[in-house]
Amino acid sequence: MAFVMLFLLTLGLKTTQAQTATYTFTFNNAPINSVITEIAKKSNYQFIFDAEYLKKAKPVTAKISTSSLKTVLETIFKDQPFDYEINNNTIVLKQKAAIANDNTFTIKGKVIDSLGGPIPGTVIRVKGQSTGVISSQDGSFSIQGQGNSTTLVFTFIGYKEREYTASSSIAGSLISIVMASEPSLLKEVFVNGYQTISKEREAAAYAIVDNKKLNEQINIDLLSALEGRVAGLLNIKNPTGSAPDKPLLRGIGTFSNAVGTSPLIVIDGLPTEYTLDEVNPYDIESVTVLKDAAAASIYGSRSANGVIVLTTKQGKGSAVKINVNADLFITGKPDLGKMHYASTSDMIDYETAVYNAERARFATTESMFESYSDNKYYSPLYQLYRNQSNGSVTNQQVNNTLNQWRQNDYIRDYTENVWQNEVRQRYNVSFSSATDKNNTFLSLNYDRGKERIINNVNESFNLNFKSTYHFKSWLSATFGFNGTYANDYVTENTYDSFTIQPRYAQIVDASGNHVISDYVNLDDNFSSGGSINGLTLTKIKANPEFKSFGFNILDELNQGITNQKYLKLRTFANIQAKIYKGLSFNTQFQYEDSKLNREQYYDASSYQMRYAYNMLTSYNSSTAKYTHNLPDGGRYYQYEKGTNNYTFRNQLNYNQGFGKDKQKHFIAAIAGMEIRQTFAPRTIEQLRYGYDPITLTSVNLDNNTISTAGITSYFGGTKTLGILGRTQQETKHRFASFYSNMSYTFNQKYNLTGSVRVDQADFFGADPKYRNRPLWSVGAGWNASSESFLSRYEWLNLLKVRATYGINGNVDQTSSPYLVARRRNDTLYPTLQYTDIVTLPNPKLRWEKTATTNFGVDIAVFNNRLRGSIDVYNKYSSDLLVTTDLDPTVGATSRTLNNGALKNRGIEVSVGGDWFKTDDWKLSSNIIFAYNKNTVAEVNSGASTAYSYIGSPSNYFKLNDPYNSLYAYRYGGMTNGYPYFLDQNGQANVTFDANGNPTSVKDITSPDAMVRVGQLNPLYNGSFSQRIAYKNFELGALFIFSGGNKLRKDVTSLSSYDITDEDLTRRWNSSGTSELPRLYVDYPLALQNSAGTLSSLWQYSDVQVLDASYIKMRNISLSYSLPQKISQRLRIASAKLTVQANNLWYWSAAGDDIDPEAYSLNSGTRAYEIPKSFLMGLNVTF
């Protein structure tokens, strides 16, 4: 089949000028292509034609001067082997019509895309022939068929070739040919945010996730859309769900929490303070993840963690297209059976054992309760036994009560009455259009969700606008804005837990009535508080000076609700001007502004205010007078915070080819400067007590007395009330950067790339040695498959070898090179002011830097059906900010300095294949694998105790060990239910007498006593995705896996009575049948002081370590696309319905229902499992 090329030549002048102009041409044996170019220069018309036509065209000799373009065309194309047609401002060259005969018929139609938009320039030919016709600007065509039927072939770049058999019976009718897009036929481009380079000219390590991949399933947010799509990119789950998930690329490269580990986010070329969860995924056209220094170093001192570049959608198609998405998310309640809580009956038996053990240490029951005074909580079960002891209730009544309580289940009541299924609705509407002068994209998104806790609701509205104007052929501009408004209602977070009341308590009775508990073990969260018990209630019974301590969680969920309103705006502009051949200039500006307003109100009748009112009441026994130091009324808190940032960039761009067909040598280069500012003004807070929401009045308090000196409470002790802090601060940082990047390609085979950037910032040190350090990169690539000795292998479509080296940076915007002091007011004497030092000066403060070496290979075989890439990298991060020991004579024992180093080495593999493909069936798979190993290469500080390394592995590290190493004490064994452990000399820390009772217990503090048992960060991770399509149905599944790291078991405390897990039923007993040690309740009084030591050693011992590997089915989806014929009848372009389930299944090497993603690996603490969710989405395009 002849090679078909489309040539589109457009030079725009105003139409009115073209209509009135005089055309003067002189041609002397001129090639037809130069003739067409000359005509285009002097008119407002674009030419569309098959390149095959020009090969057969005759040279032109003519002298023309006329005001009629038609006369020009008739003269030029006379005696040529093709004809022409004028359609609006387009001139279509087409095959001359054959002389009609009895065996021919005319086929007319229109070529459109899946959205109903025309596809001008489509080549239509009769199968078996090399020439044909080309569709006009509106997609229409006309071609002659022969015989009873003719098979037509439709081809256009970026679309799948389509055949259509037309019978002679359709003559005179208009047919519609829908072309399906084929992204693999388009040249993939590398977008780094500063420039766009064709993939074959780039040597960097990066990954592109296009719009099709992003929308293969319904995504909660953009980060979930990227999960399992990019080798080396991890989605780090927050175990408690209290904060958004975070991305991590190629391991951790810093010790500092202030620096952070998340990649830099870039939207349409400019760095942003947005996070991935704040971006509407329906606005994103593609995502490019920059991995190595050659890809990311152009971003300088913010790029060491990698860069994620988001390209937003723009207008497409000549007609306005409307796309509508409606999504429904339903997330079930967590399965609390996997938390392994003890049953209500077991809890009652355990608490009775605790009561008996405690009671045995006192002469009488009442003396035990008197020891509690007013400031120590005891449970309703204790109060029941107290009533039994003093005769208030009979033994039978006690047994009846206990039997009734055994039927209760506070957790069941909580999950049925406080929790609800999370329901989220999301609606997205976008409008898109494009012409030769302008393209516009507008989207509106509304999202509303009911959270797990009743009364918790969040909603957001997002508006996105982007428009590009082509003022002249050399001048264009893009303007746009994005705005998000969110409004959340969140209940008091204290009520997120069901441990605030005993397991045998009730929330509602059999009739659904609220059950009011006399008291609970809960304070108000803003006073110094105290504990309540039965003695407390006895003292205030029938005393009108006090308010009730009664509590029911359903009543309190209506109190203390936080209303949070959030507004975030982003505006941007990009003006681009072509200066000369290949040379252009563009200027960009972006401004971001955010406002957060948070309000919280507790009514006077709320539990918190009643509690605080009582606790802050004092009593003068000599005058018998009560003083209520907290006024009656509510509590109102308001918080306002804002930020604003801007980025301004000017850049020169050069893209030019030289040599044969301008492809022998090709240079793509940029150079520019960028200034940025981030500003966080002072927060505004106000706190009012005695607040009346109707009159908006409040009562002034004596803050010095009530917050500092405190008041003597009626319930004993000195009580205080929290007030707002007195510290105010605002932060402004400014950056100035100069950068350049260049790539050179020789003969479309060999690539060289390089970049350099110099960053200046106001928080870098004053030492000139560190102020002008460049960040740079170099790279080389070889398109081996273009070599003659390989290109002859038709099965090899791509083989490319890449190598790069470069240096990126990271900054800590909280550090300062200067001596920082603050003015203080003395607490007791407010008029006395003084200054104290916050941080010492650090003139050598500089950015953290990461040097990365990367080797990669890309390959595609068997007509691109099997594709893959492999990258091997070595990252060395130095000058890391880390706490460093100082000479105490300088005024401090330690300081955060650039004095640490980390090594990360890894390998990344991606393999994708279309294994089976027919007209009806398609089977495709993708496998991703990433391995990363890090090592602490330099550190100049250490901890003096083993527990510092064990309890805080992200703050204390050992040289040549992995960052976040898991350390443990060495377990020695157990005697008579008492565990013992080995110190640095191998000696047991517990000595026993002949009966197996401890005579001494020593703590183990030396770091030499601990052993490294693994690491908390996974060594490897990856994914497997599978998609099966049959006609209009498509089934997809995504599996993820992670492993090579460790976790600690969730170990029951040996030093507390407050135990709720099922281990309390398997604890040590005198028969010695349990493998678990004694609990606190089983310790003799003389040894209880040692229980804390043994409990900590037991929890962090080497026998409590498990494998943290897991495999999960992240999602499975089934979609159905409406057949095109039905869509056309409904007058819509397309429609697709998707149903999906997330987190249906997982396997964990640790077993015991442990989900490593919902688990604190180092402390061994379970969180609620990630619940199953069910999704439904409808997409309709008009």
Image (cartoon, helix red, strand yellow):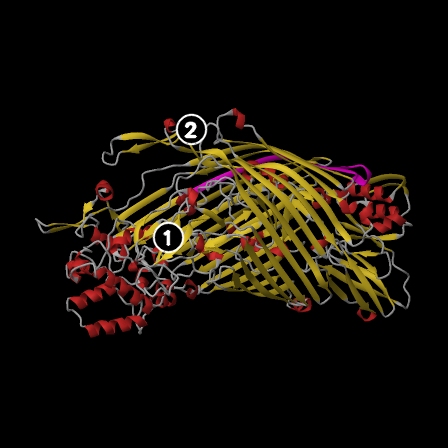
Main SS of the magenta segment? Answer: strand
Mark 1 or mark 2, whichever is nearer to me:
1
**Quarter assignment of residue 459:** bottom left
Which residue in the structure is indicated by mark 2?
A: 841
**What residue is rendered at 84% in x and 47% in y?**
73
Q: On the picture, is 63 further left or further right than 730?
A: right
Regarding residue 179, the answer to whether it shows in the image is yes
**Quarter assignment of residue 391:** bottom left
Q: Is residue 643 magenta?
A: yes
User: What is the three-letter code of the residue carrying label 2?
Assistant: Pro
Q: Secondary structure at mark 1?
A: strand
Give percent across and percent down for residue 888. 37, 29
Which quadrant, please, contains the C terminus? bottom right
**Earlier residue among tags 1 and 2:** 2
Residue placed farthest to the front in the image? Answer: 994
Give percent across and percent down for residue 445. 52, 56
Position of residue 862 relative to residue 592, above or below, is below
**What residue is rendered at 22% in x and 71% in y?**
398
User: What is the three-letter code of the residue carrying label 1?
Assistant: Tyr
Q: On the picture, is 300 further left or further right than 550?
A: right
Q: Which residues are magenta?
A: 641-668
Q: Secondary structure at mark 2?
A: loop
Q: Is residue 1110 magenta?
A: no
**Quarter assignment of residue 1060:** bottom left
Q: Nearer the viewer, residue 1072 or 625?
A: 1072
Position of residue 513 relative to residue 979, above or below, is below
Q: Nearer the viewer, residue 1173 or 491?
A: 1173
Which quadrant, please, contains the N terminus? bottom right
